[in-house]
Image: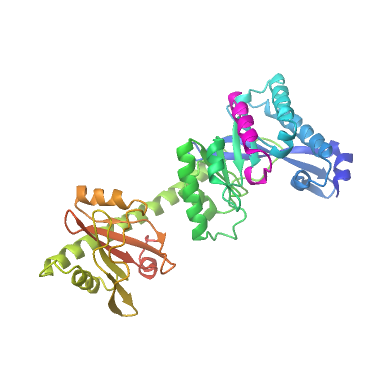
Amino acid sequence: MDALDVIMNKDKIVPYFQPIISADTQLVIGYEVLARIELDDGVKSLGWFFKDHSIPEEYRQEVDEYVCHLAIEKFLSLKDDTKLFINVDMNEILATNGERLIKSLKSFELNGLLLSKIVIEFTEQDFKGDFSLLKHLLTYIQSLGVQIAIDDVGKAGSNLDQIAQLKPNIVKVDLEFLEGDAFPQLYRDVLYSLSLLTRKIGATLMFEGVGSFNQLNYAWRNGGRYYQGFYLSRPKPNFQKSDFCKMSLKKEFHHFIHYERKKIEAQFTLTEKLGLLLKNSLKKLKSLDSYDDVVMQIAKELDEVSFRVYICDHDGYQQSGNAVKDKNNWHLEEGSRFKNWSWRPYFLENIVRMNYERKGILSDLYTDIEKDEIIRTYSFPIDDRLFLFVDIPYNYLFEQDGLI
């Protein structure tokens, strides 16, 4: 099938609707409009048609307007607060200074559709034009009550700073391109940054391409409020009951919550265990005058749990060398003495917390720069000015339930 076949068979083109589910209510909050063509050999997606810029713009525009018209006619039959997500190419929109899009929005309104029910969706990294013009147009569109969704965020090329300046209502992250259920740590870190970004700018984080139980769990654990994908529902020519997947989602959320609760309990257990071990170990020490002796003796007490131990003061300056485990032996490394670690995320916050609560803190999972592996760090207050840091290797965490 080529572009001419699509134009010649325009009467066979229909809108399909893929539901978007909210985590808080487990109900459908919107539908994304997707163009399909119904042929003798089955229903086919027209996604390729809109992405192929070798096809004349007027062809793509004609089909786009035709599909939108049909979609809105159907959508007007819904009497709830469901939203309609419409994909646009911002390069083509800004080629007419946004006039085409504004005209379309006004026509939707004349047909009885509230603009507050429309979400305009576009891909930020595909935009090649003037960023200031884009920002100005989106601000104007939002002033009409229309919401803005930026698609495919998190893939290579996404500019988080620009996204923050555009202030979208919804940030969409695609899980479809990941292989199976594998989530590289780098991608996890990007998603963590995205979760913080959306929270700061007041946007909603949405995961699309949810194709499996594990991907749904991943979206839930990473702050996704909205979900979309074949695991929940394939696109269909008609709308579905708003609660069509409510019961199944409630069951899956129960599994997620149960598992996360076990992980939190495991982290508390390890925190209590290490706190008790360190209290007993510090009591055995005859003197705290030699910080190197302290970290070497503590390290040997925690031989099964740690691979590196060191001491910092309350300003973040390392006061000891590193007690480092090499195979089965501990030795002292001098290279990090007097380095300052206060620039690390949460370092000073944790120092204050330890001083206030008088107990140790277990970090989140993160990648150690030197070992290039996932670890956790347990920090413990020796007194008001000195703090012990115990790095826990991946192998130990992997062997314990709930620590990875």
Q: Is residue 345 above or below residue 25?
A: below
Is 233 or 64 nearer to us in this picture? 64
Rendered image coloring scheme:
rainbow
Is 114 displayed left or right of 392 in the figure?
A: right
Is 385 or 360 nearer to us in this picture? 385
Please name the predominant secondary structure of the magenta segment in the image.
helix
**Position of residue 200 measured from the top left corner of the image (x, y, whole percent):** 45, 38
Residue at 52% in and 39% down: 164
Is 247 or 284 nearer to us in this picture? 284
Is 249 displayed left or right of 46 in the figure?
A: left
What is the quadrant of the C terminus in the image? Answer: bottom left
**Position of residue 234 measured from the top left corner of the image (x, y, whole percent):** 66, 46
The region drawn magenta spans 124-146
**Position of residue 118 measured from the top left corner of the image (x, y, whole percent):** 63, 29
**Position of residue 305 measured from the top left corner of the image (x, y, whole percent):** 30, 69
Is 386 displayed left or right of 346 in the figure?
A: left
Considering every residue shown, the one lying at the far front of the view is: 338
